[in-house]
Image (cartoon, rainbow, N blue to C red):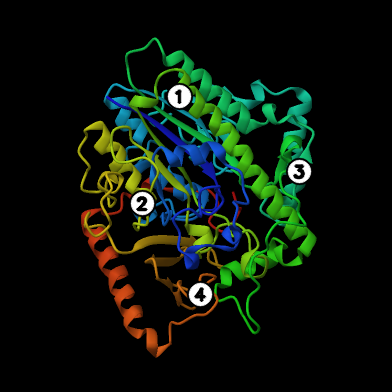
Amino acid sequence: MPNLLILVDDQHRWDALGCAGLGLRPEQRSWLLSGDDPIVRTPHLDRLAQTGTRFSQAVCNVAPCVPSRHSFITGMRAGQTGVLTNMHYWPRDPLYPTIGTVCEALGYETASIGKMHWKPQIAPEEHVPTKRGFAFRVSYDGPATDGPCDVVYDDFATDAERAIVQSWSDRFGRGGENRHGYVGEVTAIDGNRLPDSWLADQAVTYLRERRPTDRPFCLVVSLDRPHPESVVAQEYADFHDPDEVPLPPEPPGQFEEPDSHLQALRDRLEWSEMSEEDLRVSIARYLANVSFVDACLGKVLDALDEFGFADNTIVSFTSDHGEMLGERDRCFSKYSTYDSALRVPLLVRWPGVGAAGTVSDAAVELIDLMPTWLDALGAETPRRLPGRSLRPLLEGLSPAQAGWRSASLTELYTPSADGSAPRAQWAVRTGNYKLIERQAGDSALYDLRNDPEEFVNRIDDAAFAGVREELRTTLLHRLMTESEDCPAGDPTMVAIADPTAFRPS
């Protein structure tokens, strides 16, 4: 039986990889990929891409952290899990099996090291009573967000280090997604003792201790960066000169943001007050943290080679969602259905399947990971799972040859002003066009070939009427089909920590 190594980080843009621009046409490149040379250094993830497959058009199925993590670890969309926002969670046993649950039943050794985000921090401590299929748990945040844990960062850190880490939340707020959190700081803690590096070291130790065992393993390694607060280790502080980093394109004159929720966040979290200097520092430190994450995950990948597991381990790397990074006139974070928020890096290496160093432009979604893992384990994919195994794409088939979907689907649920049910958005995306249908607010249609920044709304343009109706039909068919084949679970199994609160995390 093959091993599974599932690498995850948090809030990582699709284009923040050294290899992200390879194989893309000029119109597919972003402002971070505008130069001849990669702006960000990710040698370890680049090496993973060179030995596996990179999916250049992959999207998350729901943007915020908590619902996205519940989604891809179970293979279910947020509308099925019932975990719609960062305030929703399962207070008791999982509503659906996780990959840990599946592997545990097959006799695997299972572990999750790092951020699972089973609940918001303000949820009752007694909620999430089990490890959800992962026999060994290591966490930075501990039971406040991750449930039962065997090892936590606080047990490792010195008193001085714990005080510094606590000061980040005190000064930048929980989640750090405000203006000051994105600007961040250079920390006095040595990079090798920061939480993400410690988590990677725990994963290396876990792999080292697996060598004498005959049982296969399923190991999830989940890091917090490059999610803000943008605290950077001294060793990475000079990776990017703020005066030299590219800036997001400026919206055209008379531009008005159609997403009212994003507008409100921009004002409330003070993104709109950022100076150009603030913006440049934020971008530079975000990219430095991407390189820091790469170095941390590189330790895990090197251990996989050193301890002899690489040839029998399926490795996946992705992120729970993207990051806007100052686009659309100082918008940050992931609370939107624009490309920079919903597109994610996705690398998969399945030894013996497909050719190394390939790039697929298929309309892939994170819910396709669970069917892929089940396929590798020789387990049947339940009908309730709306995704598909990536195997035919890994084997080199084109999307047409594989009979792959022509459009991807991402949903987003944002809190309503009066505390009633969250309001939905759905984004249907092909390689050339995107339709955003908003339950509250203006819908939008974008011509991604000629308007990759999604500035010009073509929803009422007669020249795009055919595209609009085709994408609306695709959305309706997808939602209807999945509501029949993959019905939502029992809503009484879902808790809402604070129905009126919006706490970025």
| Rendered location of residue 218, percent (x, y) | 38, 28
- Please state, as top left, top right, bottom left or bottom right, where the N terminus lies in the image: top left
Q: Is residue 414 in sight in this rendering?
A: no
Residue 29 is left or right of residue 333, and the answer is: left
Task: Kindly identify the residue that appears in the image at 61 percent across and 47 percent down.
Answer: 227
Task: Indicate the position of residue 135 as horizontal and vertical percent values.
Answer: 41, 23
Label 4: which residue?
Answer: 451
Q: Secondary structure at mark 1?
A: helix
Dot 3: few (<14), some (14–19), or many (≥20) neighbours within 10 Å?
A: few
In x, y percent, where is residue 101? Answer: 33, 31
- Residue at numbered disc 3: 238
- Identify the secondary structure beneath mark 2: helix
Residue type at the position of mark 4: Asp
Q: What type is the residue that disc 3 sits on?
A: Asp
Q: Earlier in the sequence, mark 2 or mark 3?
A: 3
Q: CA distance from mark 2 to mark 1?
A: 40 Å
- Three-letter code for the amino acid on which mark 1 is drawn: Leu
The residue under label 2 is 491
**CB atoms of marks 3 and 4 within 8 Å:** no
Q: How far apart, in angstroms, are the residues tagged by discs 3 and 4?
A: 33 Å
The span from disc 4 to disc 1 (Cα, nearest Å) is 42 Å
Name the residue carrying label 1.
Answer: 304
The residue that appears at 30% across and 53% down in the rendered structure is: 488
**Does residue 365 appear to the left or right of 180 in the view shown?**
left
Between circles 2 and 3, the one closer to the viewer is 3
Q: Nearer the viewer, mark 2 or mark 4?
A: 4
Front residue (pair 429, 61) = 429
